[in-house]
Image (tube, rainbow, N blue to C red):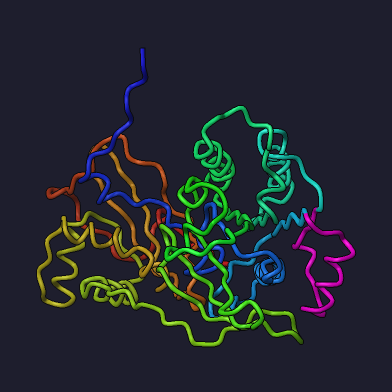
């Protein structure tokens, strides 16, 4: 007998706090599986090494903040001597949190175990770069469907990225023939681009020039084009134009809630009780159901403003706690410890309940973890 589908209703989903997506490079590289594709000898390895270095040091990649992490770079087409020479060119100091390997097993033949063993040895791992994808593929696959083979290879590594909440970047090649859609230029079937969470296409405006464009498209990032230029003296891809970042609109009630929390420091109660407190604070009446949903929707904004969230559901009350720790995020990173398990019972807003607790902060107040 087949297993019963595990489902969640829409109302519960909209009122349940889930773990926020972790970005290794804010706004550019989230946790998940990503493709960095470009023509041979275009400078993909220089870019990959620099990205690894910046994440290992916790320093910006162009205008994007990074989450300082342990980094593994599988340089499978290079030697340690060549990697050393490249490091000499791009930096004076390299951290011991950046690790290199020039040999590995292939997908389905030990690579997955090697990666997981590395992560267990270095649990603070945030980024793994494999240069190149072709070097870790098993060319003896019995699958007669090229699309299925490509998709399976990508999905195998994506499962590791999702399991450990890290970013895995696969360096890959482009076809020699051009196409109006850059994704169609990625070598192989559409199973490679389709299976990845994000695709980065590095193209030069002209082969003999140093100027290029990095096309960025994915499920969890804003689609954009970064205009770059390769500096032959520093061996770095430098940004030619400022990055235009789309400003996300924040609901006015969330801004009001942020101000309210900064004044009371902590609140524990139901959405109905919070709506009453906000009415006393500002004079406007808010629907408890809509208020709770907006809190969940704008959780990242609250976190960035030093406000953490936790739930405490009992048979009598279904309440939550908001607390302001006075440490507003100043680096734009969205890494936080918060509930990720879906509730066993549908979410409901309690109308008849005890009065809400407003300071001092109870032990239920979750502490936001920042690096």
Residue 251 magenta-highlighted: no
Q: Nearer the viewer, residue 246 or 279?
A: 246
Query: Where 163 falls versus 70 (above or below)?
Result: above
| Location of the C terminus (image quadrant) | bottom right
Q: Quadrant of residue 257?
A: bottom left
Residue 83 magenta-highlighted: yes
Could you tell me residue 210's position as x and y percent?
Answer: 65, 82
Could you tell me residue 182's position as x and y percent?
Answer: 47, 64
Instruction: Specify whether 45 is left or right of 239.
Output: right
Q: Which residue occupies 72% across, 51% down?
A: 122
Instruction: Specify whether 199 is left or right of 67.
Output: left
Outermost residue, front side: 177
Q: Quadrant of residue 370?
A: bottom right
Q: Which residue occupies 21% across, 75% down?
A: 252
Instruction: Specify whether 109 is left or right of 308.
Output: right
Q: Is residue 327 visible?
A: no
Query: Where 332 falls versus 360 (above or below)?
Result: below
Please give the count of numbered marks on the rendered protein. 0
Q: Which residue occupies 34% across, 78% down?
A: 247
Q: Which residue occupies 71% across, 68% down?
A: 41
* Span of residues in magenta: 77-101
Q: Nearer the viewer, residue 263 or 194?
A: 194
Q: Nearer the viewer, residue 354 or 243?
A: 243
Could you tell me residue 6's position as x and y percent?
Answer: 33, 30
Query: Where 5 falls versus 167 (above or below)?
Result: above
Q: Is residue 5 visible?
A: yes
């Amino acid at each position: 007998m087949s297993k019963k589908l595990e489902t969640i209703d829409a109302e519960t989903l909209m009122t349940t706090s889930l773990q926020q997506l972790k970005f290794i490079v804010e706004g550019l590289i989230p946790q998940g599986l990503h493709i960095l594709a470009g023509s041979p000898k275009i400078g993909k390895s220089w870019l990959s090494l620099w990205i690894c270095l910046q994440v290992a040091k916790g320093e910006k990649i162009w205008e994007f903040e990074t989450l300082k992490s342990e980094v593994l770079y599988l340089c499978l087409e290079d030697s340690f001597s060549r990697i050393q020479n490249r490091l000499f060119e791009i930096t004076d100091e390299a951290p011991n949190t950046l690790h290199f390997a020039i040999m590995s097993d292939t997908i389905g033949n030990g690579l997955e175990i090697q990666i997981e063993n590395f992560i267990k040895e270095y649990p603070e791992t945030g980024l793994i770069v494999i240069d190149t994808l072709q070097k870790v593929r098993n060319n003896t696959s019995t699958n007669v469907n090229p699309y299925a083979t490509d998709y399976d290879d990508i999905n195998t590594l994506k499962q590791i990225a999702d399991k450990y909440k890290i970013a895995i970047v696969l360096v890959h090649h482009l076809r020699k023939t051009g196409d109006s859609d850059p994704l169609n230029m990625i070598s192989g079937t559409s199973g490679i681009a389709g299976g990845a969470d994000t695709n980065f296409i590095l193209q030069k405006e002209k082969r003999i020039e140093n100027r290029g464009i990095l096309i960025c498209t994915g499920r969890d990032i804003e689609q954009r084009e970064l205009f770059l230029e390769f500096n032959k003296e520093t061996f770095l891809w430098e940004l030619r134009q400022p990055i235009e970042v789309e400003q996300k609109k924040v609901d006015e009630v969330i801004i009001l809630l942020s101000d309210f929390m900064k004044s009371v420091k902590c609140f524990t109660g139901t959405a109905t009780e919070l709506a009453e407190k906000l009415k006393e604070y500002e004079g406007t009446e808010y629907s408890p159901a809509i208020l709770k949903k907006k809190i969940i929707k704008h959780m990242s904004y609250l976190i960035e403003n030093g406000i953490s969230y936790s739930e405490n559901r009992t048979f009598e009350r279904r309440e939550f706690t908001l607390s302001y720790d006075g440490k507003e995020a100043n680096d734009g990173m969205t890494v936080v410890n918060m509930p990720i398990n879906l509730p066993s019972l549908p979410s409901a807003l309690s109308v008849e309940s005890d009065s809400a607790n407003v300071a001092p902060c109870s032990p239920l107040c979750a502490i936001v973890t920042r690096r």
